[in-house]
């Protein structure tokens, strides 16, 4: 007798998630350039909003929790924004390098994290540079892959597994 199990992996609107994420990053980068003295409020708000956006689009909880926790730490302890944001960028850069294979953006993210640690006085401008770089590259990647099939579809992938008894 054979028992059938069906596993459904659902990618919840990856195109919309990428576009909203890019718009959020670009808007936050522009705000950071305009109001660099409020960088802790802007960066903390961005990270919390990013985590909530991840939760809304059903990204795994551990990935969604990372920006929320970092944003909360920045709100509570605004003096450690260089260390907190550099740590977030370091982890984010490693994720980009290892998981998603965006090698150029991953390396640039790690470089910006190191620059933030080395020069904490210019943290607002480095954060703005990262956000603008990330937002623009995400929009380019999203629209470049629009018709190509990778990451641009809202379909479910179903896989049936047969287990013999």
Image: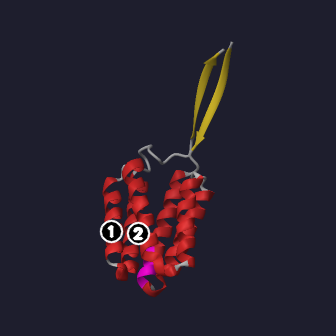
Q: Which residue is mark 1?
A: 114
- Residue extending farthest top: 1
Residue found at x 35% / y 81%? 122
Q: Residues within 10 Å of mark 1 (few under 14, many from 20)?
A: some
Choose top left, top right, bottom left or bottom right for residue 73. bottom right
The image quadrant that residue 114 belongs to is: bottom left
Q: Is residue 88 above or below residue 59?
A: below
Name the main secondary structure of what is drawn in magenta. helix
Residue 165's tag is none
Per the image, label 1 sits on a secondary structure element best described as helix
Which of the pair 57/154 is nearer the observer?
Answer: 57
Q: The C terminus is located in which quarter?
A: top right
Residue 60 against residue 92 in the figure, above or below: above
The answer to whether the residues at label 1 and label 2 have Cβ atoms under 8 Å apart is: yes
Task: Report the front residue among 111 and 14.
Answer: 111
Which of the 4 quarters of the picture holds residue 57? Answer: bottom right
Is 117 on the left or on the right of 54, as rendered? left
Residues at marks 1 and 2, CA–CA distance in whole angstroms? 7 Å
Where does residue 160 sit, x and y in percent of width and height? 60, 26
> Magenta residues, as a range?
29-34
91 to 10, vertically: above or below: below
Q: Nearer the viewer, residue 35 or 85?
A: 85
Q: Is residue 125 magenta?
A: no
Element on which disc 2 rests: helix
Whole-percent x, y for residue 98 in the image: 38, 49
Give the numbered dot on residue 86. 2
Q: Position of residue 141 (x, y in %)?
A: 39, 55
- The residue depicted at 59 percent of the width and 54 percent of the height is 61
Identify the residue at image location x=61%, y=58%. 55
């Amino acid at each position: 007798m054979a028992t059938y199990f069906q596993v459904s992996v659902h990618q919840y609107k990856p195109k919309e998630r990428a576009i909203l994420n890019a718009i959020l990053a670009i808007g936050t980068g522009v705000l950071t350039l305009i109001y660099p003295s409020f960088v802790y409020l802007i960066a903390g708000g961005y990270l919390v909003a990013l985590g909530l956006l991840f939760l809304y689009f059903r990204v795994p909880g551990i990935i969604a929790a990372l920006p929320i926790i970092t944003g909360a730490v920045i709100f509570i302890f605004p003096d450690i924004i260089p260390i907190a944001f550099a740590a977030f960028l370091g982890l984010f850069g490693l994720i980009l390098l290892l998981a998603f294979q965006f090698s150029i953006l991953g390396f640039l993210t790690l470089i910006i994290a190191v620059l933030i640690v080395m020069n904490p006085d210019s943290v607002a401008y480095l954060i703005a540079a990262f956000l603008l770089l990330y937002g623009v590259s995400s929009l380019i990647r999203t629209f470049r892959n629009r018709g190509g099939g990778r990451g641009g579809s809202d379909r479910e992938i179903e896989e049936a597994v047969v287990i013999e008894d």
